[in-house]
Image: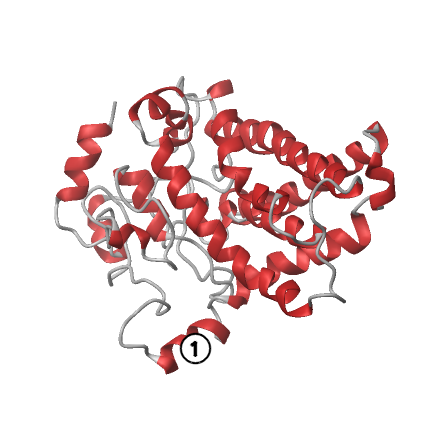
Amino acid sequence: MSDQQRKPRAEEYVAEGRNARGEWRPPYPIRYAPLLQWPVRLKALFKWTFGWPGFLWPVNLSLLLISIVSWYFTQPEIIRCVDFEFSWIAQIWLRNQVMMWLYYGGFHYYLYIKKGEGRNKKYDPNWPAEDSRLFLFRDQVYDNVFWTAGVAGMIWTGYEVLAMWLFANGHIPWLEWARNPIWFVAWFFIIPFWREFHFYWVHRLIHWKPLYKHVHYLHHKNKNPNAWSGMAMHPIETMLYLSVCMIHFVVPSHPIHFLFDLQHAALGPANGHHGYEGPIVKGKVPTGSYFHYLHHRYFECNYGESTIPLDRWFGTFRDGLPDGEGSKLAEEHKD
């Protein structure tokens, strides 16, 4: 058995900065972005907005670039979308599958097949479950691929197909750059915040006991999430989660705004679920979300993300410090 395959001994956990269960955590508490703080810290806000890593780089601008390339090079011409036809629908589905396999699959290949980081800064020291009755095909990765690329990929495509048909037939308002360039650009800055706001409230909704029991439980099987866990959800949860894009059905926007919103929602979870704290790849690629890992670990905390302090405002924030409450919550909800 190689050093990367075996589980570290208890004395090694201490050397790696892990607790007795082998869980890794950063040596500092989770902090929110300096966006809605008083008094305003201009220097910190500027650095967060334009620095690396920050609001723009690397995630939001990378996903925006993907949306721009999608619109100009892979999207069916809008005139083709006037009628529902197999050819352009299949084109969208195939393009979405390629993006998903490259994005999610890229993290999976580097972190879990090549094991490029080993267990360094891996939140949970264990690898994805195998021969487990908890998952389809008795395998966590196969299960997650089925729900993410298979089911979520279809629902993602369904939302996009509906939107393109609505845009093509003039049933939803179309925002043109020439008529309102300021609002056109503003959309790209608004979408990440809208996504985070929408995610928090949908997430709180599906933790309502009846929905958790029949819907959200599926996602929470992944107490040790991996690169394919991000969209491993029940179809109802996926529809609720991706409904973030429906704002474009009523508020004037361009199809490229719609693509950015939907692709941000569909691809973004890979960054927060792969199970590692960045930066990775020789310390060059900022990624990972200990903020969200704590939700998978303790359930009733950190429903949102770390930009808008919704969890702090509504009393559901956990900063990762070892105060004992997290273990209690985990025990209460382990069934």
Q: Quadrant of residue 198?
A: top left
Let me know if residue 40 appears in the view.
yes
Above or below residue 61? Residue 3 is: above
- Of residues 221 and 4, the one drawn nearer to the viewer in this rendering: 221
Q: Tag 1: residue type?
A: Lys
* Picture quarter with the C terminus: top left
Element under disc 1: helix
Q: How is the image coloured?
A: secondary structure
Q: Position of residue 182 (x, y in %)?
A: 64, 69
Q: Position of residue 70 (x, y in %)?
A: 74, 51
Q: Position of residue 66 (x, y in %)?
A: 67, 55
Above or below residue 265? Residue 193 is: below
User: From the viewer's perspective, is 134 left or right of 267?
Assistant: left
Looking at the image, the residue that sits furthest to the left is 324
Residue in view at x 28 percent, y 37 percent: 299
Looking at the image, the residue that sits furthest to the bottom is 43
Q: How many numbered tags mark residues here?
A: 1
- Of residues 33 and 172, the one drawn nearer to the viewer in this rendering: 172
Q: Quadrant of residue 64?
A: bottom right
Residue in view at x 12 percent, y 45 percent: 324
Q: Quadrant of residue 218?
A: top left
* Picture quarter with the N terminus: top left
- Of residues 282 and 88, the one drawn nearer to the viewer in this rendering: 88
Above or below residue 140? Residue 16 is: below
User: From the viewer's perspective, is 52 left or right of 172?
Assistant: left
Q: Position of residue 271 (x, y in %)?
A: 49, 51
User: Can you identify the residue that label 1 sits on?
Assistant: 47
Residue in view at x 51 percent, y 19 percent: 137
Let me know if residue 223 appears in the view.
no
User: From the viewer's perspective, is 68 left or right of 193?
Assistant: right
Graded by Cα atoms within 10 Å as few (under 14), some (14 to 19) or many (20 or more), the crowding at tag 1 reads some
